[in-house]
Image (spheres, helix red, strand yellow):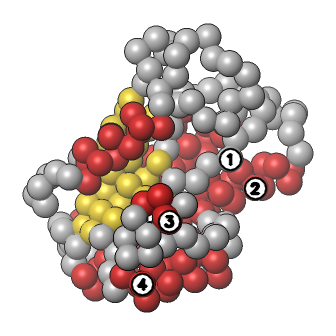
């Protein structure tokens, strides 16, 4: 995978379970060893599950909350000291349209509400508690995207991964004085 992105001088592939603190700390340490700094943190991990609070195992729920909420928080915790030291950087927190509109019976939706709130809480900590206005925070909330996440075809064409990549790059490429706070993006046919 790193080879597809330009090789070792441009990309680093490190296996990491974002719900495990030791893994996240190792990822950050290896990144700093390889590149010396962190310019952007893309917190993009998600596990879904069935709908209904009487379905799915408790272990599946634990994995979902561990990845979708704790994983984001651990990523922030592991990277924030470096970004504060640099006095620069950009967090992109991947949430979901399900984090804007409650999906009935969906723990996944609840975790994505938490992901959106985490982005706002981080922005508040930076601005209010740390008096920092140089580290930016963007929450991206996509609707349906063509990924293995869905176990059956959707009734309308979903977004493609490249659509989300362009959205993320749009936020990252803004001038330093522009903080694109939230981006909600859906396929045109998604209700």
The reply to whether discs 1 and 2 touch (Cβ–Cβ < 8 Å) is yes
Which of these two is toward me, 122 or 141?
141
Q: Quadrant of the N terminus?
A: bottom right
Residue 173 visible in the current orientation = yes
Q: Are marks 3 and 4 in contact (CB under 8 Å)?
A: no
Q: Earlier in the sequence, mark 1 or mark 2?
A: 1
Cα gap from disc 3 to disc 1, whole angstroms: 23 Å
For the point 68% across and 54% down, the residue is: 65
Disc sitting over residue 2 in the figure: 3
Task: Measure the C-alpha gap from mark 2 to mark 3.
Answer: 27 Å
Q: CA distance from mark 3 to mark 4?
A: 13 Å
User: Of marks 4 and 1, which one's residue comes earlier in the chain?
Assistant: 4
Residue tagged 1: 47
Q: Mark 3 vs mark 4: give the one in front.
A: 3
- Is residue 35 rendered to the left or right of residue 136? right
Helix, strand or loop status at disc 2: helix
Q: Residue 185 is drawn in which quadrant?
A: top left
Disc 2 crowd, CA 10 A, few/some/many (<14, 14-19, 20+): some
Residue plotted at (65% across, 82% down): 22
* Residue assigned mark 2: 63
Within 10 Å of disc 4 (Cα), the crowding (few <14, some 14-19, many 20+) is some
Which mark is in front, 3 or 1? 3
Q: Residue at x 75, y 38 (%)?
A: 49
Compute the Cα span from label 1 to label 2.
7 Å
Name, please, the residue furthest toward the bottom: 33
Marked residue nearer the N-terminal end (4 or 2): 4
**Residues at circles 4 and 1 in contact by the CB criterion of under 8 Å:** no
> Earlier along the polypeptide chain: callout 3 or callout 1?
3
Distance of mark 4 from mark 2, alpha carbons? 30 Å
């Amino acid at each position: 995978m790193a080879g597809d992105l330009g090789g070792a001088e441009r990309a680093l592939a490190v296996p990491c379970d974002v719900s495990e603190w030791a893994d996240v700390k190792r990822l950050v340490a290896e990144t700093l060893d390889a590149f010396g700094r962190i310019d952007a943190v893309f917190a993009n991990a998600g596990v879904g599950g069935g709908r209904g609070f009487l379905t799915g195992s408790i272990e599946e729920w634990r994995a979902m909350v561990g990845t979708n909420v704790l994983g984001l928080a651990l990523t922030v915790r592991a990277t924030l000291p470096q970004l504060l030291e640099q006095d620069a950087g950009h967090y992109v927190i991947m949430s979901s349209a399900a984090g804007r509109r409650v999906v009935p019976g969906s723990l996944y939706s609840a975790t994505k509400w938490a992901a959106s709130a985490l982005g706002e809480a981080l922005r508040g900590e930076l601005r209010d508690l740390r008096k920092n206005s140089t580290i930016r925070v963007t929450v991206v909330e996509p609707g349906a995207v063509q990924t293995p996440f869905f176990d059956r075809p959707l009734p309308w064409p979903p977004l493609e991964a490249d659509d989300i990549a362009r959205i993320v790059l749009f936020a990252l490429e803004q001038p330093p004085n522009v903080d694109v706070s939230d981006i909600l993006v859906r396929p045109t046919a998604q209700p």
